[in-house]
Amino acid sequence: MASWLRCASLALLSITGASLHAGVYKWVDEQGKVHYGDRPESAQSQQLQIQSAPPPDPDAVERMERSQRMLNEYSDDQAEQKKKREAREQEEARRKANCELARKRLDDYEHASTLYVTDPNGERRYMNEDEQKKALDISRAEVKKWCDT
């Protein structure tokens, strides 16, 4: 594909160069309007001296392809960075929500006179002192896990 693009570019440049070798004329009509053309239209037509296009640069296509690859890599890097940033933001939001939940639970446990669990039948079973201490320790560990970064 690169060779096809290179050939097409060279062909286009050679066609453009050939058309510049034809004469370019300038003249002013009776109404004072300026015209340009490839043939003299009147005796007052002036042939303009136009420099021909520089020869085609065979490395130009390669440079363009290299530039495009670099732009694509940059774009890919930007997309990857955005994806990572969004993942970090989601993780941060998750940690914040879990921290708030853990702090609320710890506050509830610390200010409750008694703690209970609900059994599979929906009945409350009150925790003994050791179970309450263990529940508080677990709750404090959850606060540390989610809130201390």
Image (cartoon, grey):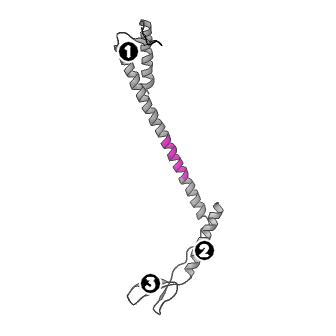
Cα–Cα span, label 1 and label 3: 92 Å
Task: Judge whether residue 25 can be spotted in this image.
Answer: yes
Tell me the residue that label 2 is attached to: 14
Please determine whether, in this image, residue 149 is positioned above or below residue 125.
Answer: below
- Position of residue 60 measured from the top left corner of the image (x, y, whole percent): 58, 64
The residues colored magenta run: 72-83
Task: Judge whether residue 55 can be spotted in this image.
Answer: no
Q: What is the count of numbered marks?
A: 3
Ranked by sequence position, the earlier of labels 1 and 2 is 2
Q: Amino acid at mark 3?
A: His
Tell me the residue that label 3 is attached to: 35
Contact between marks 1 and 3 (CB within 8 A): the answer is: no
Please determine whether, in this image, residue 67 is positioned above or below residue 90.
Answer: below
Please determine whether, in this image, residue 70 is positioned above or below residue 125.
Answer: below
Q: From the image, which quarter does the C terminus lie in?
A: top left
- Position of residue 94 measured from the top left corner of the image (x, y, whole percent): 44, 30
Residue 146 among magenta residues: no
Cα–Cα span, label 3 and label 2: 26 Å
- The image quarter containing residue 9 is bottom right
Tell me the residue that label 1 is attached to: 109
Contact between marks 1 and 2 (CB within 8 A): the answer is: no
Q: Amino acid at mark 2?
A: Ser
Ranked by sequence position, the earlier of labels 3 and 2 is 2
Q: Tell us which disc is closer to us: 3 or 2.
A: 3
